[in-house]
Amino acid sequence: MDSSIFKAYDVRGVYPGQIDEDTAWKIGYAGAKFLLSRAREQHSNVKQSICAGYDMRRDGNLLANAMIKGMNAAGADVIDIGMIDTPQMYFAVNFFGNCGGVQVTASHNPAQYNGFKISGIEAKPVGADTGLTDIKDMAMSLQGEEGKGGGLVERFDLTPEYTKHIRKFLAPMVKGLKIAVDASNGMAGKFVPLIFDDVPIEIIPLNFTHDGTFNHDPNPLVEENLRQIKDAVKQTGAIAGFCFDGDADRLMLVDENGINVPADLMVAMMVPYFLANEPKGTTVIYDLRSSRVVREEIEKYGGTPSRNRVGHVFMKKALRETNGVFGGELSGHFYYRDNFYADSGLITFTQMLNILFAAGKPVSEIVKPLRRYFSSGEMNFKVDDKQTMMKGLANKYKDGQIDYLDGVTVQFEDWWFNCRPSNTEPLLRLNVEARTKELLESKLIEFKTILGEPIHGH
């Protein structure tokens, strides 16, 4: 087994070169052993069964079947919930009250990839620091298909219960909106029609087929992958365009003119909507790359801002610990207290519909007052000695307010930056925001003299 398929938050690689049915069996076996033992240690009332699902990738069903056999061999009963979006796995684990679940998915990666996302009790993420390293060590040590634990398999279609769960987030009066939706040939293509077909809105569907082939890579963070949704919005007169990623846990928005609305501004849009019904001081979480607008809006509407490290493991933990109402990060993941502190592209879609209907004006007008700063977006620089470079930046800008929550962040009154290292590559990721366009441009020139020219494609 190729050890490089184990990442910080999940397992991912090319099929069949790096991940095949044998890999899936071993991950099923090791994952089940880990989840069952964790459940026995922590919760006597948790059901000793595991949920299994897969997305639309061509080899997903094959890998899921092999994984389930591995889980059974480890002694686990399995609830096979079939072809689902990843957030449905988080729902399933909580719905059944069992010890975890594994979704076969490669999220936003190109078609040749597949992988596994593992969740524990209450769908808490299992990453390198919370058990994935233990699962890796066990899976790597397995010789063949050992173990005859003899667990059972029950097949279950959760669509009716899941639909009810998503629909409870949609305001009952929403109607008359004309929107375009790009499902990126992913799981939103299956579940948007199932969940929203009887809502009196007009949906212009793009790339709703989900057979494992992609018209564009299912990653809405890449500008080229938004071209179709932008064209569709402008050609049809839709009031907004939405683009999901492959496994439908992320969502990005474009306005009626086909202009991107960054995810931090989507958080800012949602703040008044959510905080209106919450006690004063309720927490909203956001990642530390987000515009200052997010903190300002949270404070303006009586909430408590909570700035956090990048990554779903940290965001979910922060939301749970603060019992915050919701939060989001620049990658397009949005997290909800009433969704088991987990992320969901479909729930974000309902929230945007609620806001568009309530506002009764174009997206560009809703967002206009929030576009009060100028941002670089995330830029990547190739740097061999990342730690030394970050120390140098902290030293150069030592007159500012410095913190090391995730990389180095330095804040001044009229501008700030965050520079953090990639987990897997010799890259530094830089975000800069300033009060004026001129100041932003002058700071970017300064950074390029230190870091070199940014590279593209990451």
Image: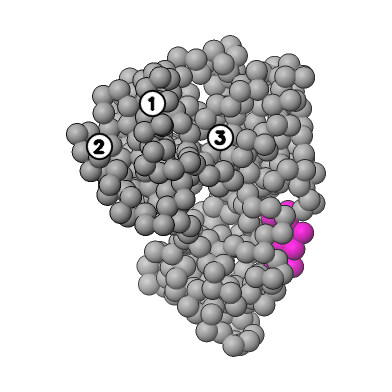
Query: Comparing marks 3 and 2, which lies closer to the viewer?
Result: 2
Is disc 3 in contact with disc 1, using a CB cutoff of under 8 Å? no
- The residue identified by callout 1 is 442
* Horizontal and vertical percent position of residue 398: 21, 38
How far apart marks 2 and 1 lie (CA) works out to 15 Å
- The residue identified by callout 2 is 397
Residue at 48 percent of width and 57 percent of height: 425
Observer able to see residue 369: yes
- The residue identified by callout 3 is 348
Residue at 30 percent of width and 54 percent of height: 388
Q: Amino acid at mark 1?
A: Ser
* Horizontal and vertical percent position of residue 148: 62, 86
Q: Is residue 85 left or right of residue 444?
A: right
Up-down: is 343 above or below 414?
below
Up-down: is 365 above or below 21?
above
Q: Is residue 325 left or right of residue 156?
A: left
> Which region shows up in magenta?
53-63
How far apart marks 3 and 1 lie (CA) works out to 36 Å
